[in-house]
Image: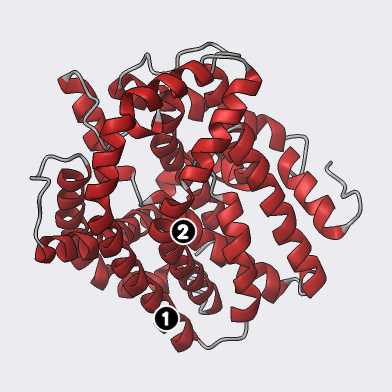
Amino acid sequence: MKNRIGFIDFLRGFALLGILVVNLPYFSKPMYLVASLGENSTLLDSIGSWIVAFFFESKFYVLFSFLFGYGFFIQLENNPETNSKSRYFRRILGLGILGLLHGVFLFIGDILLSYAILGALLWFLRNKSSSWLLKFSLSCLVIAVFCRIGMSFAEGEFRSQLEVNLPRLLQESRKAYLGGFWESTVQRTKDTILSIPFLVFYQWPSVLSMFALGFYAAKNSIFTDWENTKPELKKLFPWALIFGIIGNFVYTLHSRHILPENQGVFLKILFAISDTFSAPALTFCYVYLLGNYYNSERSFADRVWFESMGKLSLTCYLGESLVCTWIFCGWGLGYFDQIGSFIVLILTVPIWIFWGIFSMVWKRTFSLGPMEWILRSWTYWKTIKIL
């Protein structure tokens, strides 16, 4: 690859778009209505929800987790100064603090705190062999399958209890998020706590798997020379594409409750396997196609855009949440639960463009993004130069 770090930043910039698409519905309406209870009232809203489910959901936190593992290995391997245990865990602690604040004040689906908790384990993986990392990654996905199976059996009881209490929960949620800053913060904290089981059992095994896979990719310099890497990836691409399309089609039907609700044990197991493996399969296809594009002559202008966002990924991730919170909460524009799924999907475009422009303008003057500067200064326990 012409510039390994450049491509990783390019992927981070791309991932920020996908993460925004998935996260925005959780800003725009009560979390109980995002997918689970068929809230869509128009065909366009249904189409918007299906697009998000098929192309975006579960694919981009997988990609971001892979890039997180890749980036941390590069830091530990190639920068002796960061190969310090105290400094490493100070960085992890700083990331966790940012994640906690993000979850309380901005977004119920924060991933940074989870990255900090699971990222602490990466220190102990740094000297593991490539084969061990692959086995560990696969083992985590197997655990993810069993977690999803367990959650599927608990879903029926959860949904029945939710439907009984739904009118009250929706009223409380709408009142809080359309109220003042303090009311929305209290409600968001409650919602964040309620989402913990989902994060732990649904996301954590897959996140840890992608951390290890990112370590493996960096350890073996998968993206160092694209022309040498491409033939091996090309062999996997057709199979990953077929499985990714079929699996994510099933996931879309299942997650949007188009299929019958009462399913036998066999179907629950089948859905769990499909859900766990089809998202990484489609993510692999995204990475392969983007790798080909990045290394083509057509990509030069887009490189600057995506790489700028990728270099400011922490700032853009938190900034996207800040803008979305302002749009939907009562202390801002107050559009909470007033916009359909299709319009919400379209709304991701101007928000993403805004942060793309911000990143390009910022990088012309500063070497680090504002949040990257804060985290790095905390990590090194001194004020880092930002110019």
Q: Which residue is the site of mark 2?
A: 200
| Quadrant showing the C terminus | top right
- For the point 25% across and 65% down, the residue is 237
Q: Position of residue 329 (x, y in %)?
A: 53, 18
Q: Give the numbered dot on residue 134.
A: 1
Q: Position of residue 307 (x, y in %)?
A: 57, 45
**Observer-nearest of 372 and 293:** 372
Q: Earlier in the sequence, mark 2 or mark 1?
A: 1
- For the point 17% across and 47% down, the residue is 254
Vertical placement of residue 272 versus 304, above or below: below
Q: Position of residue 317 (x, y in %)?
A: 57, 40
Label 2 vs label 1, nearer the camera:
2
Tell which residue pokes out farthest to the right in this image: 382
Tell me the amino acid under the disc marked 2: Val
Vertical placement of residue 62 versus 33, above or below: below
Quadrant in the picture for residue 21: top left
